[in-house]
Image (cartoon, rainbow, N blue to C red):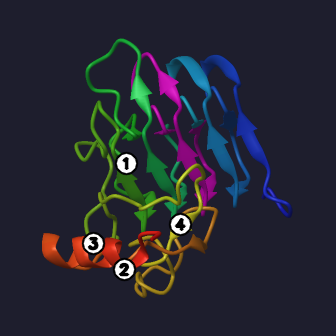
Amino acid sequence: GCGWPRVAISRGGGGGGGGIELGSGILQGCLVAENEALYFGGGVLGSGYGVIGNTIVGNSASQDGTGIFVNGTPGRVANNLIAGNHGTSFSSAFGLYCATIDKVSRIECNNVWGNPGGNYSIANCDTTGGNNLSVDPQFCEGSYTLAEGSPCSAEVNTACGQIGAYGVECSLAPVQATSWGRIKAGWEALRPR
């Protein structure tokens, strides 16, 4: 695990597993951001491992698994927020990709969203019934923490608990419907005389 304070694995590079390549063990509670892989697994490449409760964002790979590339031996991929990862040349550079037909790995409670090459490679990964999402995580401005009301927060997502490495750190500004006349009257009241 990454421990406390949260460790950021960033700006790494390699042929596969731009951020980190796991053969065993558990990657938990980490920020994996802005890494680049020449081939597979822009953020994480691994088999026989656990990737649990991480925020995996802004990574790139020329082929599949721009966020996470699951290869071979079954593992567990759960409660990860995988967003904004992109392929550099291959059209099917999914955020979460399984290289082999893998109906044994536990792919559950992840939010894979906004990955231009696609989110889940459902042809090889079994993501059904695992409470997986593909929705806007509602990050706080300028960070990867969650805004109040985020579908990734433990308060909203009671089936899975928190998704991603970071919890709620900001609130959304409330928006109220109003008329132009009311806005003008409010300005008039505040205007210096």
Mark 2: amino acid: Ala
Q: Position of residue 88 (x, y in %)?
A: 41, 15
Q: Position of residue 54 (x, y in %)?
A: 61, 56
Q: Around disc 4, counting alpha carbons within 10 Å, would you say few (fewer than 14), some (14 to 19), or many (20 or more)?
A: many
At x 31%, y 78%, the residue is 186
Q: Which residue is mark 4?
A: 146
Mark 4: amino acid: Leu
Circle nearer the N terminus (2, 3): 3
Q: Which residue is mark 2?
A: 189
Kindly state the secondary structure of the residue where label 1 is placed.
loop
Please, is residue 68 above or below residue 11 in the view? below
Kindly state the secondary structure of the residue where label 4 is placed.
strand
Give the residues in magenta: 45-69
Kindly state the secondary structure of the residue where label 3 is placed.
loop
Q: CA distance from mark 2 to mark 3?
A: 55 Å
Kindly state the secondary structure of the residue where label 2 is placed.
helix
At x 32%, y 63%, the residue is 133
Residue 129 marker? 3
